[in-house]
Image: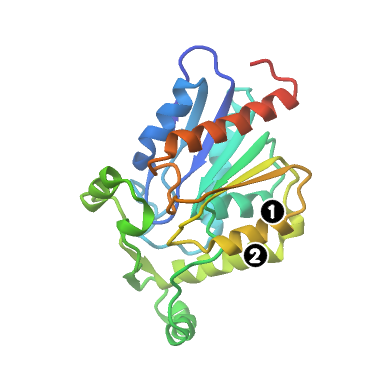
Amino acid sequence: MWKWEAEGEAKAVIVMVHGAMEHHRRYGWLIEMWRLSGFHVIMGDLPGQGMTTRSRRGHIDSFDEYIFEVKDWVQAAYQYELPVFLLGHSMGGLITIRLLQEERLNIAGAILSSPCLGLVHEPSKFLNVVSFGLNTLLPALRMNSGLTVDMATRNMDVREADVNDTLYVTKVSVRWYRELVEGIKLAFMNIEKIQDIPMLVMQGGDDKIVKKDKVKEWFNRVPLSEKRFKEWPKCYHEIFNEPEREEVFEYAQDFVKSQLKAIGYIL
């Protein structure tokens, strides 16, 4: 877990949760944008990813490992005694959803960026069936994820950096895949259990990794008193890396500021 503090007096704390295969270093630009805008940022690498060594790369025993980890980051954010917001991208968005279904946290709002609620490229029916058996016999068996950097963003600088990124996970375990599928299933099954906090869901309109129709379906069904949906038509999956990212950031920041005003926090 790492902390980046705002210059001067901070307005709130942003707890960021990265997606599958990646790590916190890919969020340098976004972290700096929040920090320069007056927000503390807390973020870490999820189990089995980035610089963590608690489990094998690309492998987890249970999706709960992610939930427990992010809960610790939120607890660390409380130490600032400021409003706390969650920002989860892709699988990080799914983790955020599952955390808010399982826990009741002191959170001012949540932002989901292309949350992983359905995959565009799923394994064949045969492989899917086989994965159930392998999950019992060889849960740590790792296979190519099938995802490429070209699917994630149109930003050529980010693509080039990802190709040369030794921390980027390229293979995932059978158990990891089964736990991801189960996590998505529970996000829909337990939709009524989610904590009622303001939420902004932003989705890439040309997402080649996550099924945007499943994201919209979940959003339409989730019983929140205040929710906002924004689709960015030309964007691929990583909306905070796309050429439009400054506009995306401003939209996210506007949501955070509106929630701070709503709770009477002086900006």
User: In x, y percent, where is residue 8?
Assistant: 49, 12
Question: For mark 2, what is the residue?
Answer: 186
Name the residue located 68 percent from the left edge and 15 percent from the top edge.
Answer: 266
Looking at the image, tell me whether mark 1 or mark 2 is earlier in sequence order.
Answer: 1
Name the outermost residue toward the front: 233
User: Tag 2: residue type?
Assistant: Leu
Give me the C-alpha separation between circle 1 and circle 2.
Answer: 9 Å
Residue found 39% across the figure and 69% down from its top:
173
Helix, strand, or loop for circle 2? helix
Quick one: label 2, few (<14), some, or many (20+) residues within 10 Å?
some
Dividing the image into 4 quarters, which one contains the C terminus? top right
Across and down, in percent, residue 247 comes to: 48, 35
How packed is label 1: few (under 14 Cα within 10 Å), some, or many (20 or more)? some
- On the image, the x and y values in percent for residue 88 come to 53, 46
Please name the residue that numbered disc 1 is placed on: 101
Query: Where the N terminus falls, by quadrant?
Result: top left
Residue displayed at 75% across by 25% down: 263
The amino acid on which the numbered mark 1 sits, given as a three-letter code, is: Gln
